Amino acid sequence: MLIKSAEFVMSNSDVAKCPKSRLPEYAFIGRSNVGKSSLINMLTGRKSLAKTSGKPGKTQLINHFLINKNWHLVDLPGYGYAKVSKSAKKVFQKFITQYFLLREQLVNAFILVDIRHKPQPIDLEFMEWLGENGIPFSIIFTKADKLKPNAILRHVEDYKTELLKTWEDIPIYFITSSSKDIGKYDILNYIEQLNGN
Ligand code: GDP
């Protein structure tokens, strides 16, 4: 899939106020600083569509972007940032939970994980929760340029081993680097395939 247009639609913290259109939707979520904004900018070929944040945890909204006028890319807030207060975390959990449970247009969630780190409980628990609620997801490993090829393979294998403790199958996963433009078309073509065109 080539990106012909990418437009910001709206930001809000209430799933009921998300766009009413029935366009298929793909959500991107991960721990703060995982490289989500950079990935969205790589995918869309726009330098600053998503704001790469100097201040992790600041963008606490559901952000809709209309891509090629026929699907929505949804940038969800980063989770697991320690400096957000407990009450802010609760509010955050609530609206994100509501988004995933109520948003019928959602076709697939992409969970971003930094390829350099060992599998983190917060990510594994989130995937578990998605699975329990029947929400399809894929994993996007970010920042692959930071590791040598054999280390990439080793880290992915570690992740698979961890996942197989609770899952029967490994979800589809993508290895990416926004700074080296790696993985862009794997993800875009996957979305195109799910969109059925
Ligand atoms: P977000 O908080 O998840 O949206 O993360 P950002 O996209 O703002 O990125 C967080 C930091 O990681 C920034 O300093 C980025 O420059 C850096 N970063 C993001 N993606 C990559 C990547 O693919 N490779 C490298 N080396 N750094 C990256």
Image (cartoon, rainbow, N blue to C red):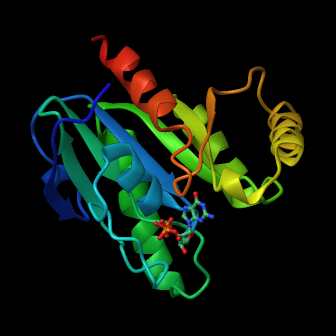
Question: Residue placed farthest to the front in the image?
Answer: 180
Residue under the point 82% across and 34% down: 160
Q: Position of residue 84 (x, y in %)?
A: 51, 85
Residue under the point 38% across and 57% down: 76
Q: Position of residue 95 (x, y in %)?
A: 35, 60
Question: Residue placed farthest to the top in the image?
Answer: 196
Image quadrant of ligand 1?
A: bottom right
Q: To which quarter of the image does residue 128 belong? A: top right
Residue under the point 47% across and 32% down: 187
**Residue 135 appears in the figure:** no
Considering only vertical position in the picture, is 114 above or below 22? below
Considering only vertical position in the picture, is 117 above or below 144? below
Q: To which quarter of the image does residue 22 belong? A: top left
**Image quarter (top left, top right, bottom left or bottom right) of the N terminus:** top left
Residue 55 placement, left or right of 115: left
Considering only vertical position in the picture, is 139 above or below 171? below
**Residue 157 appears in the figure:** yes
Residue 84 placement, left or right of 20: right
Nearer to me, 141 or 32: 141
Q: Position of residue 132 (x, y in %)?
A: 60, 34
Q: To which quarter of the image does residue 157 belong? A: top right
Residue under the point 31% across and 61% down: 47
Nearer to me, 69 or 2: 2
Q: Position of residue 56 (x, y in %)?
A: 49, 79
**Image quarter (top left, top right, bottom left or bottom right) of the C terminus:** top left
